[in-house]
Image (cartoon, rainbow, N blue to C red):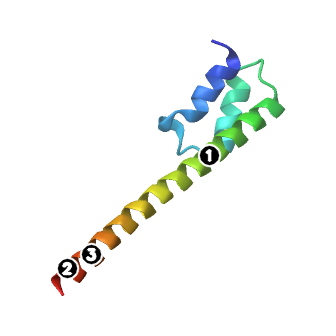
Amino acid sequence: MKKIDVATEFLRNPKIASNSIENKREFLRKKDDGIKNNRIEELSQTQQQSSVFRKIITDLAILGLLATAFITIKRWFQSVV
């Protein structure tokens, strides 16, 4: 496995998700001698974009569930009346 792949997996690890991005970068600088600062920055940005994308997808899924529940409740009330 390449160093860059190991670094990518490290950034995706849920166990370290609560660590600050600076702590993650510092760890990668110390741990992986071959990874340059600009590459670490690229990985960090990719990870942040993935997190934002994941949040958007989750929010859309919740919105879809709420919309479905609302429609179901509305139909139920209409059938009762």
Residue ID for mark 2: 79
First of labels 3, 1 by sequence position: 1
The image quadrant where one finds the N terminus is: top right
The residue shown at (69%, 43%) is 22
What amino acid is found at the position of numbered circle 1 in the picture? Ser
Marks 2,1: beta carbons within 8 A: no
Q: Secondary structure at mark 2?
A: helix
Q: Residue furthest left?
A: 80
Residue 75 tag number: 3
The residue shown at (72%, 42%) is 45
Q: Secondary structure at mark 3?
A: helix
Q: Residue furthest top?
A: 1
Q: Nearer the viewer, mark 3 or mark 1?
A: 3
Residue 40 image-quadrant placement: top right
Q: Residue furthest bottom?
A: 81
Which percent across, then down, holds residue 47? 64, 40
Q: Is residue 47 left or right of residue 77?
A: right
Which percent across, then down, holds residue 50? 61, 43
User: How far, Cα to Cα, is label 3 from label 1?
Assistant: 47 Å
Q: Is residue 77 above or below residue 64?
A: below
Q: Is residue 30 left or right of residue 56?
A: right
Residue ID for mark 1: 20
